[in-house]
Image (cartoon, rainbow, N blue to C red):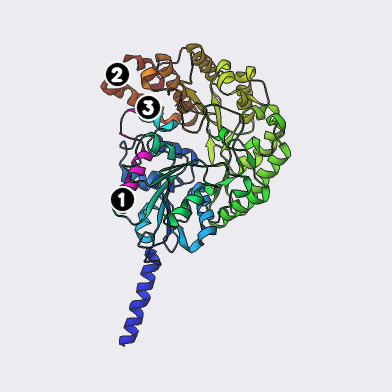
């Protein structure tokens, strides 16, 4: 009887440990993680991830974590079922070098399960740790209610965990990812007790950093990485959030405010892309995101002429993988749409069939595009290559034609627009407003943003746009874009926006931003139409 009791206790203990993930009580040598918001797929809505740049205290954090960005589920031993794609790349590199059993990726909530006496390094990936990226700088300051951005709040929450804050940790903390540069620019490395910050692509350089740490050698406080060759970029070995699969890296068009153009351009082989997509699908990801800075760069010809055959084959091949319900290109350029509208006709059926979105009750596809400005002068000055393979002088016409072609094929783009580019004049803002007028009523979602001088771009030292320099026309521009979004995408909330605008302007925003936003509030609330918009 006693032996049976002991056996039952041991069995229960094993099951309990399996659930808790306590298989390695001494800890894992290399533990990788990211903040809770970056360990979420936003219920398979990659565009909602933009809201990480919105204020954190408008909605209680507990509710946000539960309903807005629920964390990725755990596997049986406690590691993350899905993780950010960049973290999976590093995990693949480290697993090959040190052995998969010595590397684990987990959510912040499970750090206690894997960090122990055997742990040598905790690697953290971050996209916007201080909230000085494009979206965070723009909307936290514009909304001006609710404190720091959600992404910042969650990064701070991660770094303030006792095991990372204590003086004698017994392990190093290394931070990388697309937002790592913010730690250095913001002089926050010591406050967060970060031993080394890795800035740039990690495929070639990160392994050397981890080798030094594992061997007990000193590492620099800041490491700026070298550009990898394509053969050095590993395939992921475990599934990524959103089913992300990289199809190209870099750009080469030379937009001065953009970091991807600083990277070496690669188009990855279709078999490699398919292998990663299949891995994601087998793991249960219903979505595959084709990670690229421009879908139409894939295996492109000279002068950025799109390779229709390669792009059509890519889209159809990945879309047909078993288990893929949603296929989402990350970004696309507009000029190739006008250059080869037949290409759009050929890829649209698969993208719409695998689309996640609806507009006016019908199923549509979407993709992020960069309009940035309606000013030919600014296009020629800061982003001449963006118009290729067409002429920069025709930029406004190119944009309107491209959006029309996309809409005709049930593709409704999400478009970024940049306010406050260096040397921007009133005439440039007017040109952009005129372009928005030309597109009025089109099925497009606008995200206007402040110009931000990110570390890895040609304009890294340029003066940034901010609230102090916003003119009444700039405010009108922001309001007009969001009024359009409400009209097209959420007309049912129009009355609520009207009430909120009418209440918040006299109670708060007039005091916060001044009388110059009065007209913008009226436009946003639907009480008045912009003087520059002729559309209904």
Label 2, secondary structure: give it. helix
Is residue 180 found left or right of 117 in the rendered image? Answer: right
User: Can you give x and y, in whole percent of width and height, for residue 336 in the image?
Assistant: 66, 30
Residue 87: which disc? Answer: none
Q: Nearer the viewer, residue 58 or 144?
A: 144
Q: Nearer the viewer, residue 426 or 410?
A: 426
Q: Is residue 108 visible?
A: yes
Report the magenta residues as a range. 142-163
Q: Is residue 464 above or below residue 32?
A: above
Q: Is residue 424 above or below residue 356?
A: above
Closer to the eye: label 2 or 3: 2
Q: Residue furthest front?
A: 217
User: Can you give x and y, in whole percent of width and height, for residue 319 in the image?
Assistant: 63, 47
Which residue is identified by label 3? 497
Residue 510: which disc? Answer: 2
Closer to the eye: label 1 or 2: 1
Q: Residue at x 64, y 48 (%)?
A: 318
């Amino acid at each position: 009887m006693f032996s049976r009791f002991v056996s039952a206790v041991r069995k229960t203990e094993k099951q309990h440990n399996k659930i808790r993930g306590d298989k390695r009580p001494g800890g894992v040598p290399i533990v990788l993680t990211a903040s809770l918001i970056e360990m979420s797929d936003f219920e398979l809505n990659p565009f909602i991830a933009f809201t990480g740049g919105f204020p954190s205290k408008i909605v209680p954090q507990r509710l946000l974590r539960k309903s807005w960005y629920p964390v990725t589920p755990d596997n049986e031993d406690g590691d993350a079922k899905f993780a950010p794609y960049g973290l999976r790349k590093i995990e693949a590199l480290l697993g090959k070098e040190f052995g998969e059993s010595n590397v684990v990726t987990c959510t912040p909530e499970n750090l206690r399960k894997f960090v122990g006496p055997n742990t040598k390094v905790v690697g953290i990936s971050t996209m916007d740790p201080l909230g000085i990226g494009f979206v965070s700088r723009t909307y936290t300051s514009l909304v001006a209610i609710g404190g720091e951005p959600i992404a910042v709040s969650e990064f701070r929450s991660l770094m303030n965990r006792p095991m990372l804050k204590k003086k004698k940790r017994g392990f190093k903390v290394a931070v990388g990812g697309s937002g790592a540069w913010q730690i250095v620019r913001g002089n926050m490395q010591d406050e967060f007790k970060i031993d080394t910050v890795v800035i740039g692509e990690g495929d070639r350089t990160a392994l050397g950093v981890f080798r030094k740490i594992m061997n007990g050698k000193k590492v620099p406080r800041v490491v700026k990485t070298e550009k990898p060759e394509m053969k050095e970029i590993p395939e992921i070995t475990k599934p990524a959030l959103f089913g992300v699969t990289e199809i190209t890296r870099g750009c080469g068009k030379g937009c001065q405010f953009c970091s991807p153009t600083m990277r070496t351009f690669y188009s990855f082989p279709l078999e490699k892309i398919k292998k990663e997509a299949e891995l994601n699908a087998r793991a249960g990801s219903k979505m595959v995101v084709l990670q690229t800075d421009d879908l139409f760069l894939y295996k492109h010809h000279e002068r950025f002429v799109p390779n229709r055959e390669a792009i059509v084959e890519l889209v159809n091949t990945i879309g047909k993988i078993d288990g893929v319900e949603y296929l989402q290109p990350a970004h696309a350029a507009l000029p190739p749409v006008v250059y080869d509208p037949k290409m759009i006709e050929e890829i649209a059926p698969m993208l719409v069939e695998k689309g996640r979105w609806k507009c006016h009750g019908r199923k549509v596809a979407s993709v992020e595009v960069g309009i940035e400005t309606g000013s030919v002068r600014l296009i020629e000055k800061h982003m001449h290559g963006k118009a290729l393979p067409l002429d920069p002088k025709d930029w406004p016409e190119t944009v309107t034609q491209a959006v029309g072609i996309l809409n005709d094929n049930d593709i409704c783009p999400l478009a970024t627009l940049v306010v406050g580019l260096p040397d921007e004049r009133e005439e440039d803002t007017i040109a952009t407003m005129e372009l928005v007028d030309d597109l009025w009523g089109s099925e497009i979602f606008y995200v206007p943003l402040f110009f931000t001088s990110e570390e890895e771009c040609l304009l890294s030292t340029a003066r940034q746009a901010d609230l102090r320099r916003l003119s009444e026309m700039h405010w009108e521009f922001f309001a007009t874009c969001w009024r359009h979004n409400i009209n097209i995408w959420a007309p049912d909330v129009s009355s609520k926006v009207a009430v909120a605008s009418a209440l918040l302007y006299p109670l708060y925003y007039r005091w916060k931003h001044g009388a110059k936003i009065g007209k913008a509030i009226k436009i946003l609330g639907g009480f008045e139409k912009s003087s520059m918009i002729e559309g209904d």
